[in-house]
Amino acid sequence: MSPSPEKLMQYLLMLRNSGVTDKRVLHAMGLIPRDPFATGAFQDRAYEDTALPISSGQTLSQPSIVAKMTQALNPGPRDKVLEIGTGTGFQAAVLSQLARRVYTVERFSKLAQSANKTLNNLGLVNVTVITADGSMGLPNQAPFDRIILTAAAEDPPANLLAQLKTNGIMVLPVGQSSTVQTLIKITKKEIGLDYEELQEVRFVPLLSGLA
Ligand code: SAH
């Protein structure tokens, strides 16, 4: 069920007040309903700015964080984007509105299947969900214009940096899973990497191997 116009307006205002100023990102957030990505009773809280529990002990990220990470990633209409940590598929759905192609990788096959179903139901045909260990990246589709991780790594994974194009951008939370992490934006230059710290965040850890 899509939200009422009032609820949607409130949600978009909340996103704007939290620091999301990019009109394309706000537009994409408005086009993707969040309730189909929430589980059972939590669908009632889909338009609140809160993370929600999903199956396999994982979480649907807070919408303002999804929007801010999308804003930092700044995907363009011709871009091929890689997301590590599909979860519900919500972040991938938002990216699908801004990029040409989205590949999203999840280590729990149950979550990947459920995300795939939700994305199909919404008719989002430019997203491909893959069950794999995302810390290896996706070598057969590399290189990518943009890479986003929605699980926290202790350091930016070298495999993923290697699959990022020159002038490409990677956004990820870094830090130990038990503490507050830092959201960072890495720009790959001709020579070297540019790091920008964005804000404190809390994500589940990036784990290796299939679940
Ligand atoms: N982006 C999601 C929320 C992410 S929760 C959404 O929009 O709903 C983080 C997800 O990362 C979890 O589902 C977890 O299983 C997954 N994950 C953790 N380590 C991973 C890895 N190495 N490869 C792929 N997925 C991983």
Image (spheres, rainbow, N blue to C red):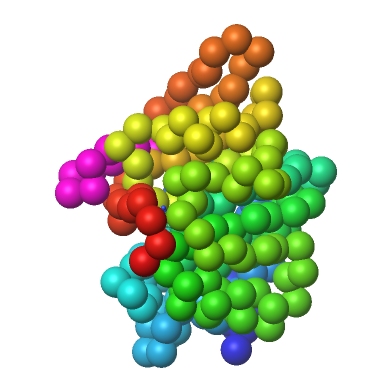
Quadrant including the C terminus:
bottom left
- Residue drawn at x 49%, y 44% is 136
> Looking at the image, in which quadrant does ligand 1 appear?
bottom left
Main secondary structure along the magenta-highlighted residues: loop
> In this picture, which residue range is highlighted in magenta?
174-183
Query: Quick check: 53 above or below 39?
Result: above
User: Where does residue 61 sit, x and y in percent of width and height?
Assistant: 41, 61
- Residue drawn at x 53%, y 79% is 114
Say if the magenta span includes residue 180.
yes
Furthest-right residue in this view: 78
User: Where does residue 8 sit, x and y in percent of width and height?
Assistant: 58, 72
- Residue drawn at x 35%, y 41% is 153
Query: Quick check: 7 above or below 71?
Result: below
Q: Nearer the viewer, residue 5 or 166?
A: 166
Q: Nearer the viewer, residue 171 or 136?
A: 136
Q: Is residue 25 left or right of residue 84?
A: right
Q: Is residue 129 left or right of residue 114?
A: right
- Residue drawn at x 63%, y 43% is 139
